Image: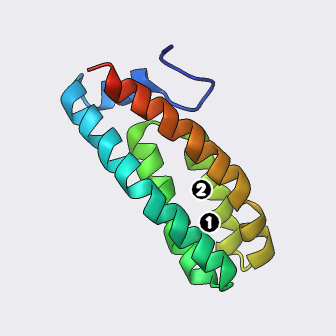
Amino acid sequence: MPHDQTGVLDLDATMTRLKGDRDFLLTLFRVYIDDLPTKLEALELAAETRELEGLLRTAHSLKGASATIGAPAMREAAERVETSARSGDLDGSIAAIPALREQALLLAHLLRQEIQKD
């Protein structure tokens, strides 16, 4: 995999932050993948129940985790949900979820590919 999949996963920057510790990188990837379905379900539930605080909290968590693993496009998708929720725009926050979900699927695929290399 190229080290930067058009902003989806920036391995070079993440490896630099982790001082080249690939084992730790793969651990972060595994934790992220394991937690992702729970986070996506929480977003969907918050959208269905129109719970602004749940959208805000979950999107914020996804944003941080995505930044940690070097996934800028996913971080930005989560930030769009979070920013709308923070400003009280429930419909805007909900409308941003499909793009986040699409980005999450792409990212999870790339993370699994990276893990399988080892």
Query: With 68 as the anchor, is 18 left or right in this view?
Result: left
Mark drawn on residue 82: 1
> Height in image: 61 above or below 54?
above
**Residue neighbourhood size for the residue with mark 2, other residues' Cα within 10 Å, grouped as few (<14), some (14–19), many (≥20):** many
According to the image, label 2 marks what residue?
Answer: 78
Residue contact at pointers 1 and 2, CB within 8 angstroms: yes
Which residue is pictured at 37% across the width and 30% down the height? 14
x%, y% of residue 48?
Answer: 68, 80
**Residue neighbourhood size for the residue with mark 1, other residues' Cα within 10 Å, grouped as few (<14), some (14–19), many (≥20):** many
Quadrant housing residue 59? bottom right
x%, y% of residue 56?
Answer: 57, 73
Which residue is pictured at 31% across the width and 31% down the height? 17
Which residue is pictured at 47% across the width and 58% down the height? 37
Q: Secondary structure at mark 2?
A: helix
> Height in image: 108 above or below 60?
above
Mark drawn on residue 104: none
Which quadrant would the C terminus be assigned to in this image?
A: top left
How many angstroms separate mark 1 from mark 2 (CA)? 6 Å
Q: Secondary structure at mark 1?
A: helix
Residue 89 visible at all? no
Residue 54 visible at all? yes
